[in-house]
Image (cartoon, helix red, strand yellow):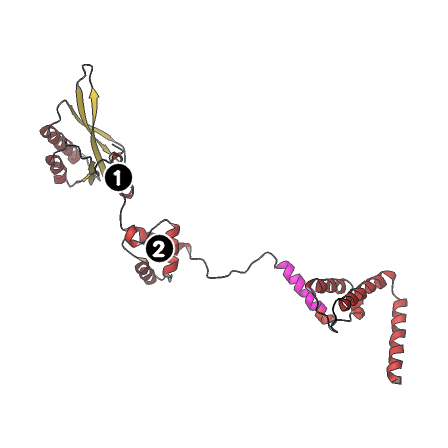
Amino acid sequence: MLFSVLSAMLALLLDLLHAATRGEHDKTIEIVALRHQLRLYERTASRKPRLSRWDKVVLATIVAKYRVLTRALVLVQLETVLRWHRAIVQRQWTYGTTPQRGRPATPAATVELIVRFARENRAWGYGKIQSELLKVGHRVSQATIKRILRRHALPPAPRRGRTTWRAFLAQHRDQLLACDFFTVDTLFLQRLYVLFFIELGSRRLHLAGCTATSDAAWVTQQARQFSWQLQEADGHPLRFLIRGRDGKFPASFDTVFASEGLAVVRTPPRKPNANAVA
């Protein structure tokens, strides 16, 4: 008992001596630290109050700036407060950087290959594209393939295999030839029929002929003469001929171009926009 009393008196004398040798600024800061810890005791009824993040920030800031206040720490040890300060500094330098979560993004080369496979092979489904990618060293799930194709406006295989008229025109524009009639009324109100051909890729126009009576024999003869012009032209890539369902086009008209290797494509009934260029 006597030893504890002497120890307490010795500690009190040392504190008084230490306080006498310190400046007013250090004393004020120490009082602030002690009052802050006292409020923590008063806020909670437990013997060891739980410190909030703000309480840790205050203590860590005070101790980091004023190392002479280590004797004023009552609730926690100095090593604990310094650990809090290191965590605060680390959080400051990493603020705003969010770690990458989830799977990494699909490489651009793989995305380009998926889109290319889907466009060049319209009958391939997600599983077929996945297997072909695996052969060239790209491991991608079917869900990823579906998401990439949807982002590039490419439907699944059954619908992707159906070629629309617009897609057909865009894909074979340089190989397409279209023909049609237009009319001219003369000064004496006589109606003339003009047959013309137009190349969709270059928009080059060919006037085949003009007649007042467009019978089957005349139309066939104009088709034959125009086909001779195509034979004389070197390296023309024309493969398709688009025409309407006008009764002025006889079956012999299609036969002439079929003999030259051109496939005749008739527009749907009552769909003039299918031959909009002509």
Viewer can see residue 5: yes
Q: Amino acid under label 1?
A: Asp
Q: Dot 1: what SS?
A: helix
72 or 65: nearer the viewer = 72
Residue 202, quarter of the rendered image: top left
Name the residue carrying label 2: 114
Residue 157, quarter of the rendered image: bottom left
The residue drawn where x is 18% and y is 25% is 194
Q: Which residue sits furthest left?
A: 217
What is the CA distance from the residue labelled 1 to the residue labelled 2?
26 Å
Residue 229, quarter of the rendered image: top left
Q: Report the quarter where the C terminus lies.
A: top left
The first of marks 1 and 2 along the sequence is 2
Residue 32 against residue 259 in the figure, above or below: below
The residue drawn where x is 76% and y is 65% is 63
- Local packing at callout 2 (Cα closer than 10 Å; few below 14, some 14-19, many 20+) is many
Left or right: where does residue 34 sit relative to residue 21? left
Question: Residue 97 colored magenta?
Answer: yes
**CB contact under 8 Å: marks 1 and 2:** no
Left or right: where does residue 266 sit relative to residue 54? left
- Viewer-nearest of labels 1 and 2? 2
Numbered circle sitting on residue 174: 1
The residue drawn where x is 79% and y is 67% is 38
The residue drawn where x is 38% and y is 59% is 143
Left or right: where does residue 233 sit relative to residue 159? left
Numbered circle sitting on residue 10: none
- Local packing at callout 1 (Cα closer than 10 Å; few below 14, some 14-19, many 20+) is some
Image location of residue 129, percent across then percent down? 32, 58
Find the magenta span and give its range: 81-106
Q: Amino acid under label 2?
A: Ile
Left or right: where does residue 94 sit relative to residue 145? right
